[in-house]
Image: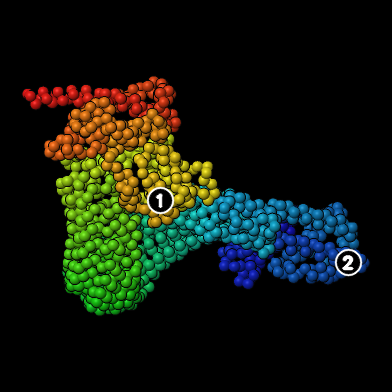
Amino acid sequence: MSKEAEMSIADALVVCRLRKNADFRASSSQKQMEDGVVQDDGYVGQSGGTEKKEKSNSVYDQLPNGDIAESSNVVEEQADTDDDCYAEILNDDIIKLDEEALKASQAFRPTNPTHQETISSESSSKRSKCGIKKESTETMNSYALFRIKNVAGTDSSWRFPNPFNIKKDYSQILMKNVLATTVFLAILFSFFGTVLIARNYTYGFTDETDRQALFDFKSQVSEDKRVVLSSWNNSFPLCNWNGVTCGHKHKRVTRLDLGGLQLGGVISPSIGNLSFLISLNLTENSFVGTIPHEVGNLFRLQHLNMSFNFLEGEIPASLSNCSRLLNLGLYSNHLGGSVPSELGSLTKLVGLYLGQNNLNGKIPSSLGNLTSLIFLGLANNNIEGGIPEGLARLSQIVDLELSMNNFSGVFPHAIYNLSSLEYLSISANSFFGSLRPDFGNLLPNIRTLYLEGNHFTGAIPETLSNISNLQVVAMEYNNLMGSIPLSFGKVRNLQLLELYGNFLGSYSSGDLEFLGSLTNCTHLQTLSVGENRLGGDLPTSIANLSTNLIHLSLGKNHISGSIPNDIGNLISLQTFQLEKNMLVGPLPTSLGKLSNLGILSLYSNRMSGEIPFSLGNITRLEKLYLSSNSFNGIIPPSLGNCDYLLRLYMGSNKLNGTIPREIMQIKTLVNLGLSDNSLTGSLPNGVGGLELLVTLTVAHNKLSGKLPQTLGKCLSLEKLYLQGNSFDGDIPDIRGLVGIQRVDLSNNNLSGSIPEYLANISSLEYLNLSFNNFEGRVSTEGKFQNATIVSVLGNKDLCGGIKELKLKLCHSKAPPLEKQHSSIFKKVVIGLLLKFDKESFLNQLSSAGVRGTIGYAAPEYGMGGQPSIHGDVYSFGVLLLEMFTGKRPTNLLFEGNLTIHSYTRSALPLRVLEIVDKSIIRSGLRIGFPVTECLTLLLEVGLRCCEESPTKRLTTSEITKDLFSIRERSFTPRPKCPPHVLEWQQVVVEGDSDDLVNPSSKKFRCRAVREKAEEIEKNTSSPSPSSAEEVTKKYGLEVGLWKILSSKDDEGSDGENKKKRSKTDEAKELLAKYGGAYLATSITLSLISFSLCYVLVTSGVDVQALLLKVGISTNETGEKVGAFALAYAAHKAASPIRFPPTVALTPIVASWIGKKVDKEKDE
């Protein structure tokens, strides 16, 4: 092939490419472009056309020498435009030329002067569209004939003609090559078919590649989130899948928009196989893992957004291969490492969003190459160092966000060159130095300026007022000095001015003049100049500021004067802060007009007068700080209208009167501080309705009365300060305050014992109970083990506790006679409890164990309820029912709707004896004991403890009251059965249940003693001391006492002296003589008995079997428990064996003790 032919073909291709791109740009607004993105082939507006032109030139330079097949291979490597041009140029012209040749041969027209024009006329339209000149067209047709000649193998001397001087006589040539033309057409079609098939295979011009890539992507999505991708299956066309957009021409995936679908899982590397992808949006999902480096294969990609996920690892450097990328969004992930310097090669990049990650290192200087960049976001990372000077080349930058990093150095000089900047944020870094005086001239387009949280010094540049569009100036928390420029009044569009926390002002009267100039800023919404050195009187012009003003902060300065009466003009005000100044005078009533006010902070001033009732009109008020002033009068009840009030502080004033009940109706209250006033009355009961209350402070007032029991319903309470008042009575039950941290009840008149549950409140950090009237023993458990947490100083009647508390020792006292029955009743309960196995017994005594046992746990625990006293009451109720019915809640009897509760309730009161444990009935109760009534009352207590609703259950105090009432009604002993005899009966009852029905133990019960005494009485004429002593020596102390107390007075036989000796005196004499001996003997024998049983049990001796041989049985559950419990059971069962030695040894020991006493008296 001649050089001329090669050049002509190449020229044709180049021209075609240029024409295609020109047509593309011309019609982009109508057909092929949408928002600058081509759907089919991935061109990008005009810049895309330029790129294609450059690539076409490079192909032209590298076009190889050889036949057209070799050239086509090179062309096939270009985009679809090259393929279209190639087909139009070659296919159409050759086919048309062959058709004309056949027609000419059939018509036998050997010559035709206009033959070339005829051939080219029908294909001229396409060639003209491709922009091919006439010379190139003739060259293509001549080249086609040249190919026919070579394929036919005839006329080997044929040469490729001069492209600009082609012969016109084609008839002879066509006549000679008719057959060759036919053969050539077949070969040509076969050739181009093969090329096209190979091209389709090479470039994947089917949707199967995309389909498989998306299937792989779906497989990596969390299974529970795949429902939103349900359309991704073979039943739906690929281009109809959710979030998928295809190109119009080749139906390849060009867009994948899955943003906001809450997808999880990892991103599949197969995403890199979507080679036609232009836009990938995965924002606002929950993807984890790393960004696949295969994303760098998407060379057509223009928009990549993976923001708001949980991606980790480093940013792949392979993203630099996506040379067409316009926007890269990776904001708000967990990406680490440094910013890849390779990103500097993405010269088309317009937006780079890398903020809110964990990036570190320094900003690469290569980012200065991104001259098209408009937005650069690196905020909220850990990037350090200075700002590269190379960033000064970002001449198109509009938005620069570098806040919340570790940058340092002086204000970056590179930024002064970015005159196009409109938004600049470098806050929360470590920049220092002063700002240039010409700041406003160098950055004239700034609208938003955030410089807060650095170390800038010097004055605020006056030239800031030259920035006509300036809206936001935030420079708080720096070290700026000087005055606040009056020129800010010229910035008419100013909306926010924040200069809080600097050193502005000089404590002088002129410091507040800027307030007058700011009245010109009618758009001003936020003015914050607190914590500076501003002095002077508060000007009345403050009431003339913009009615759009929302936030006004002048606190922590040295401002004097008073608040203007017209302050109510600022109708949009939501925050008004003037705390920690030197303001005087009253609160203006016009404050009530500020209906939108949410925060009013005036604490630590010198204001006085009454608090206006008009504050109750501010119904949206959330925080009211008036403490540390000199306000007097009462607390306005109208504050109860503030339904959104969260914090109310009025402490350290001169307020009097009572605490309004209306305050206790503000359900939203979190903090209530009224300390250091002169408030009187009691703490309202309504305090229990403040369920969100965290801090309650009413210390150092004149409050009195009992503390409300409802205080225990403030379940969110953490700090309780009631010290320095005159509260009296007991500490209310606050065990439900599981989050309480600090409690100060000192310097009151509280009395009673210190509740033991306070030792077990895990969150408690401070407890001060000093200087009250508490009494009794102080616990040594839990929190009471740490004297740095607990203080009980100044309670003279307290004893015990750890030695650091320096309390007196507790002396044990014998219980009064009237309280003996209480201990007896407890022994009965303990005796009944002992008939259960060890595991059940321990579970029932432990609150934690009850909650963990099926049938004992309160219903609310199963629904996630927190442990409470109500749950313990429920468990205690179940325990009572189990004790007296003898059936556990897990008994097989209870199935379906039948529970131990319904089983018990259905039997009351008529069939109570049918359901109770028979061992209770056979336990040797006295004649006439109201067993039915007693059991009914006990079971009713158990049922009332087991109510479904926690609030309907009995309280612990009610349970105690009911049980004591039952005890008094049912267990009051008959006069003829002395208390110590009854106690002996209960000691026996304390043994195992089987002993209660054992005939061998019945003679030791009260009835046996009474019968024996009656038998002796028949043989004895009078209850003289000598006869009583004889009975005692023979039958024991119990029978002797029975003899005295059950005998009748015989007035005639003994005269006046006998009358004066009462039964009580005789009993006392008998107890004095034999009581100590009896106790010494019985205790000694008990210790010997228990020790012997323990040694035998631990040695492996079957003590139960030995006792059984002598007719004494022990609890069958004994073998399930430990050696100690088994030895104790055997010891108790052997009590009949110990009784005779006790009776026999008592007189001997008494005689020995008596001799010793007499000897001591003689000495």
454 sits left or right of 89 in the view? left
Residue found 34% across the figure and 64% down from its top: 668
Q: CA distance from mark 1 to mark 2?
A: 122 Å
Q: Quadrant of the N terminus?
A: bottom right
Residue 104's tag is 2
Number of other residues with Cα within 10 Å of mark 1, as a class: few under 14, some 14 to 19, many 20 or more: some
Q: Nearer the viewer, residue 1154 or 548?
A: 1154
Q: Secondary structure at mark 2?
A: helix
**Of all residues shown, which one is farthest toward the front?**
1052
Q: Is residue 213 above or below residue 118?
A: above
Residue 459's tag is none
Q: Position of residue 779 (x, y in %)?
A: 25, 42
Q: Is residue 731 visible?
A: yes
Amino acid type, mark 1: Glu
562 sits left or right of 343 in the view? left
Q: Position of residue 438 (x, y in %)?
A: 31, 67
Residue found 19% across the figure and 38% down from its top: 1050
Which circle's residue, 1 or 2, is located before the other in the chain? 2
Q: Is residue 555 visible?
A: no
Q: Position of residue 1061 (x, y in %)?
A: 15, 37
Residue found 69% across the figure and 68% down from its top: 131
Residue 940's tag is 1
